[in-house]
Image: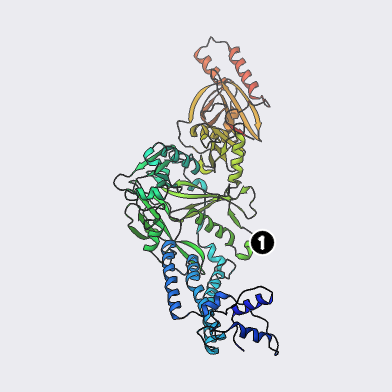
């Protein structure tokens, strides 16, 4: 009986079902005629059911040496072009490498060995039946499968539940516990970003619109990296070619400028580069594409997110962090080295992390640092505890609008990633917050119980709900030793209209203002009103001294705290002395002379410190009598009795605090 190919079986099945497929045999069937097949199928020795196989495999099995050589050349050409275009790293720890090898190496080998095995097993085409060779090629076809199996085992060995891995994941980011007031300096308003990334993008695009010769040819890249530049937080982003045709028209001249937005002053500008334009960028489609240029120059490196930065002289650079995988094949991602690429010339410098210059701010991507801290928070007490007991398991707070919950602050001339830390149940409160340095991965945790960023945003929006403003994601700042959320309030057009400060520990205490300074004054007054002892800053622009005679003094209890409200003679202000911080006020009565410092405010002014000793009305009367013996004793006595009566007055209703600060 003759060998039947898959195509013959398919044709026979179609004929038996009544389909007219015409005559002719299988061109790969070694010259077997259709009549022979019909004869064989109808012989009296029993009918063998037709066997349907993949026709592509039959054709591959019939390939000769020439066809195989041509196929290998075609695959190599396609692989070379694909490698140049997609430029995956040549690294066993890269999933891109495994994908590339699987498509262009392992899959073709498997198909070739499998087809040869089938050819010798069935005696198809030019290959005679040979059981030994069929078995050899079958065994060879297992080799690509075994390579894939190695990758699968390496992936499993990278998972956190693999024995010993949880401890490794928890130790990648070394985090220390520190005191907030000692480690975080008092806020410097020349370095605090008052706008977020969305506002920076809006300002940059508007500035770009004022340069018509650029608008028609270039657009601003969406990168907008936040860095410290000459002591100020800024966002920078290079221009890019608007489309392929704009690239063809301008590639010889390069990209002439980049956008710079000051996050403090809200000033935006397009910085022209003159004779040294940007020639290596992400908008370049071919050889000068920055990703392709750096990867092909360092083919064995795995790169993370590239960052665009400028040095202290305004020169543009690409900062290219090099990944390392420390757990299994694919787990425990961190940054091992950094490649710095000159955006104008393409020259590259390969450095260890500790050798990176001080002006570089973004070595570790923010997403990676947040992920590493979450490993620490989840696995520091073992993998089983991360799933079952969850004792002490923490995580960074979720963000808003699908984004991770973090922001950036400037500290020690570096950019630090900030995020609140909440329990594993992700409730609406934080147990503290974490700061991680993007250049060195130095990590600090500060234990402060309070509101999550999202809760703070909703609370701030509630203060201006009649205006419909939206709060930006908060920044963490230090106001008189108090951890404070600071955020901008934007209208529907994305423009910053007001600012808000919110006490992290007592998030019902919210102060808003039209300027940062106004917001700070209202916030500090609110803290003092609620009995929070503020550190002395020596800020003469906010703290003012006064003195005078007490015209009226009353007491009240606000949110469980005692307050003395004082009105001075010939003074329109009302002063709030909060207890127990200013306990000395209890010794004063109406008619006494008093000197003190206070925080100026549009509403009630908050007293900061009582200066000097109490001068009572009796002492003043005695001094007056000694100076003028003819004065009436009754007048002095009457004043003393009035002062004593006023000192005993209690329970009077306190005046409303008013202004922009409230405690709900």
Q: Residue 171 location, x and y as percent?
A: 52, 63
x 57%, y 10%: residue: 632
Quadrant of the snapshot with the N terminus: bottom right
Q: Residue 271 location, x and y as percent?
A: 36, 42
The residue indicated by pointer 1 is 389
Q: Is residue 38 left or right of residue 255?
A: right
> Judging from the image, what secondary structure is the residue with disc 1 in?
loop
- 362 versus 661 height, above or below: below
Q: Residue 633 location, x and y as percent?
A: 58, 12
Q: Nearer the viewer, residue 32 or 341?
A: 32
Q: Could one spot residue 186 in this view of the protein?
A: no
Q: Is residue 243 left or right of residue 51?
A: left
Q: Nearer the viewer, residue 644 or 331?
A: 331
x 45%, y 35%: residue: 538
Q: Nearer the viewer, residue 493 or 243?
A: 243
Q: Could one spot residue 292 in this view of the protein?
A: yes
Q: Residue 400 location, x and y as percent?
A: 58, 47
């Amino acid at each position: 009986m003759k060998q039947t190919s898959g195509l013959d079986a398919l044709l026979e099945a179609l004929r038996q079902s009544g389909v007219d497929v015409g005559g002719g045999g299988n061109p790969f069937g070694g010259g077997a005629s259709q009549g022979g097949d019909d004869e064989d199928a109808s012989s009296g020795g029993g009918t063998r059911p037709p066997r349907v196989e993949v026709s592509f495999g039959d054709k591959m099995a019939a390939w000769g040496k020439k066809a195989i050589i041509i196929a290998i050349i075609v695959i190599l050409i396609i692989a070379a072009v694909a490698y140049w275009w997609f430029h995956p790293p040549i690294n066993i720890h890269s999933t891109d490498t495994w994908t590339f090898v699987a498509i262009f190496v392992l899959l073709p080998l498997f198909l070739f060995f499998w087809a040869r095995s089938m050819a010798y097993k069935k005696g198809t085409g030019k290959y005679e039946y040979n059981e030994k060779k069929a078995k050899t090629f079958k065994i060879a076809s297992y080799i690509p499968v075994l390579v894939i199996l190695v990758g699968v085992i390496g992936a499993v060995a990278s998972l956190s539940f693999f024995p010993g891995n949880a401890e490794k994941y928890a130790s990648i980011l070394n985090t220390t516990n520190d005191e907030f007031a000692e480690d975080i300096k008092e806020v410097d308003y020349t370095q605090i970003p008052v706008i977020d990334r969305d506002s920076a993008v809006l300002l940059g695009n508007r500035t770009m619109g004022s340069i018509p010769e650029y608008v028609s040819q270039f657009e601003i890249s969406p990168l907008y990296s936040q860095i410290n530049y000459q002591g100020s937080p800024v966002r920078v982003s290079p221009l890019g070619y608007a489309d392929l045709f704009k690239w063809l028209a301008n590639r010889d001249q390069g990209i002439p400028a980049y956008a710079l937005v000051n996050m403090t002053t809200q000033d935006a500008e397009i910085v022209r580069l003159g004779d040294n334009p940007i020639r290596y960028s992400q908008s370049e489609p071919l050889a000068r594409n920055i990703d392709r240029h750096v990867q092909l120059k360092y083919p064995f490196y795995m790169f993370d997110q590239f960052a665009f930065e400028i040095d202290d002289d305004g020169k543009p650079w690409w900062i290219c962090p090099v990944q390392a995988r420390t757990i299994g094949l694919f787990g425990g991602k961190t940054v091992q080295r950094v490649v710095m690429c000159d955006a104008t010339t393409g020259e590259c410098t390969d450095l260890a992390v500790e050798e990176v210059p001080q002006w570089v701010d973004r070595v570790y991507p923010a997403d990676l640092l947040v992920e590493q801290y979450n490993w620490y928070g989840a696995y520091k007490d073992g993998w089983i505890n991360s799933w079952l007991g969850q004792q002490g398991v923490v995580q960074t707070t979720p963000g808003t609008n699908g984004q991770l919950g973090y922001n950036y602050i400037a500290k020690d001339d570096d950019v630090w990633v900030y995020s609140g830390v909440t329990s594993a149940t992700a409730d609406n409160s934080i147990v503290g917050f974490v700061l991680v340095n993007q250049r060195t991965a130095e990590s600090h945790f500060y234990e402060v119980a309070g509101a999550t960023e999202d809760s703070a945003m909703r609370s701030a929006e509630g203060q201006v709900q009649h205006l419909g403003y939206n709060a930006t994601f908060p920044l963490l700042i230090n106001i008189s030793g108090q951890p404070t959320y600071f955020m901008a309030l934007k209208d529907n057009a994305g423009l910053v209209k007001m600012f808000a400060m919110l006490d992290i520990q007592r998030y019902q205490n919210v102060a808003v203002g039209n300027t940062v300074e106004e917001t700070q004054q209202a916030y500090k007054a609110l803290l003092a009103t609620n009995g929070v002892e503020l550190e002395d800053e020596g800020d003469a622009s906010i703290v003012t001294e006064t003195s005078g005679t007490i015209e009226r003094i009353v007491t009240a209890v606000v949110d469980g705290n005692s307050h003395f409200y004082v009105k001075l003679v010939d003074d329109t202000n009302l002063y709030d002395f909060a207890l127990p911080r200013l306990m000395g006020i209890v010794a004063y009565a109406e008619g006494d002379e008093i000197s003190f410092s206070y925080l100026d405010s549009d509403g009630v002014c908050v007293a900061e410190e009582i200066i000097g000793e109490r001068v009572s009305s009796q002492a003043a009367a005695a001094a007056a009598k000694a100076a003028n013996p003819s004065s009436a004793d009754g007048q002095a006595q009457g004043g003393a009795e009035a002062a004593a009566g006023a000192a005993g007055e209690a329970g009077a209703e306190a005046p409303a605090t008013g202004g922009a600060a409230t405690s709900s």
